[in-house]
Every structure is written in structure tokens, then in C-alpha cells.
Image (cartoon, rainbow, N blue to C red):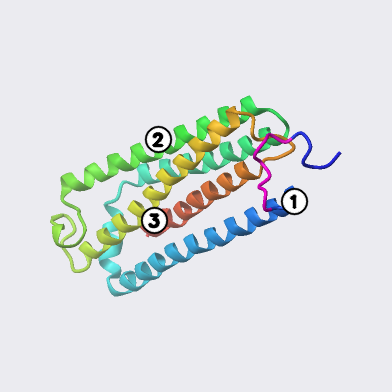
Amino acid sequence: MSPEAGLPEGILAHHYSSLERQNEAMRLGMWLFLATEILLFAGLFTGYAVYRYQFPLAFAEGSRHLNITAGTLNTIVLITSSFTVALALHFARIDKPRAAAICIVLTLLFALGFLGIKAVEYIEHFQEHALPGKYYAFEEVNIAGAAMFYTMYFLMTGLHGLHVVAGMSVLSWLLWRTLQGRYSSLYSTGLEMGALYWHLVDLVWIFLYPLLYLI
């Protein structure tokens, strides 16, 4: 029996000679896409490094006034969500679609929790007028470069938040396909690609957390 036997209709695209070749192309494409995402955040990290070198005191003071409890909780939430999405892939590969779907739902709930905690932080910053650029009016940190710290903070966490929303959209689509029975021991590459993207989202936060909260 060929590897393609028993696959749901539409899994193997017509322009691929085999499922193995299609999977290789998907993985290569995904890793290239992830490389561009890494380059995007690498640019932000470089900008952060430059401005932190110019305003070390302001960045240290700004970091002290961030909500480290919220930041730590969000780190735990995202690391746990990486575990649940990995479990989803594992269950799909051993033909347990129901368990896989439950794990994807849990991952989505963790993602919503992350965004909720971040929203609470943002509200606190708006109330304190700890805002980026010319809108900065936070009286507790009134030194040169403080506005730049919050500019980098909002830029980096805001862009990461957009990636969380994008990841949730991908996971929601994968949940629907999982419930349709599209992923199994015969084929799980689509779910694998979605899990890879979610791991990147988590990895970026693991860098943002010490850079912003633990200076």
C-alpha cells in the first residue's frame, strides 16, 4: 500500500509526486518564513540594544516600573501553551483527534489569557501616562530616554501581540481541520507547521521578558 493510501481527499496537492515531497516542501517553506520573522525581531532587538546603550539609566528605571508579576505570569502561560500545542501534535500522530482538539482549545485559552494580562498592563500604562514618544508623561520616571524605553516596550510587545493573534487564527483553523479528521498518523504536517509557528511566538516572548522586565 502506498503512503498516500487512506489519506483524506485533498491532502496531496496535484503538483507533487508524493506526500513525502510535499511534506519536505512545506517544512522548507515554513522554516524560510520563520527565518524572516526572526530577522524582523532581530531588527527590533538591535534597536533596543542601541537605545539601551544610549540611555542605560532610563531603561533600568523604566523596567523597574513594569509589572513583573504580570510579565512572569505571561511567561508561564506561553510556555505552558507550547506544551499543549506539542501535545496536540502528539495526539494527532497517534490517532487521537479528540485529545488533539482539546489540547488546541487549551492552547487558544492560554493565548487569550496572555492577551488579557497584557491588556491589563497596557491599561495601567495609559493610566500612568507611561506612553511612547511625545505622549510620555509618566512623572515617576522623568529622565532622558524614558520615553524611548516605553516606545521600544510598546513596539516590541505590540508586535508580539499581533503575532499572538495571528497564531490564534492559525490554531483556530487547525482546530477545525482536526475536528474534521484531517490529521492522523498518516498525515500531520499541517498541524506540525502551525505548532512550529506557535513555538516561535513563545520563543520571542522568552527573549522579550528578560530584556524588558529583568534589566
- The reply to whether dot 2 and dot 3 touch (C-beta < 8 Å) is no
Q: Residue at x 23, y 42 (%)?
A: 123
Whole-percent x, y for residue 74 in the image: 42, 42
Whole-percent x, y for residue 194 in the image: 56, 45
Q: Which numbered mark, 1 or 2, is in the foreground of this view?
A: 1
Q: Earlier in the sequence, mark 2 or mark 3?
A: 2
Label placed on residue 214: 3
Neighbour class for label 1 at 10 Å: few (<14), some, many (≥20)?
few
Neighbour class for label 2 at 10 Å: few (<14), some, many (≥20)?
some
Q: Residue at x 75, y 50 (%)?
A: 18
Q: Please say whether residue 10 is one of the residues in the magenta stretch.
A: yes
Q: Residue at x 36, y 40 (%)?
A: 115
Q: What element does badge 1 sit on?
A: helix
Question: Of residues 43 and 67, which is closer to you in this image?
Answer: 43
Label placed on residue 113: 2
Q: Locate the C terminus and report the quarter of the image it occupies.
A: bottom left
Whole-percent x, y for residue 182 in the image: 64, 34
Name the kind of residue labelled 3 in the image: Leu
Whole-percent x, y for residue 212 in the image: 36, 57
Question: Of residues 200 and 182, which is closer to you in this image?
Answer: 182
Question: Of residues 34 and 59, which is closer to you in this image?
Answer: 34
Q: Is residue 73 left or right of residue 9?
A: left
Q: What element does badge 2 sit on?
A: helix
In the image, which residues are magenta?
7-15
- How many angstroms separate mark 2 from mark 3 (CA)? 22 Å
The image quadrant of residue 54 is bottom left
- How many angstroms separate mark 1 from mark 2 (CA)? 37 Å
The image quadrant of residue 46 is bottom left
Q: Residue at x 47, y 53 (%)?
A: 206
Q: Locate the N terminus and report the quarter of the image it occupies.
A: top right
Question: Of residues 81 and 54, which is closer to you in this image?
Answer: 81
- How many angstroms separate mark 1 from mark 3 (CA)? 45 Å
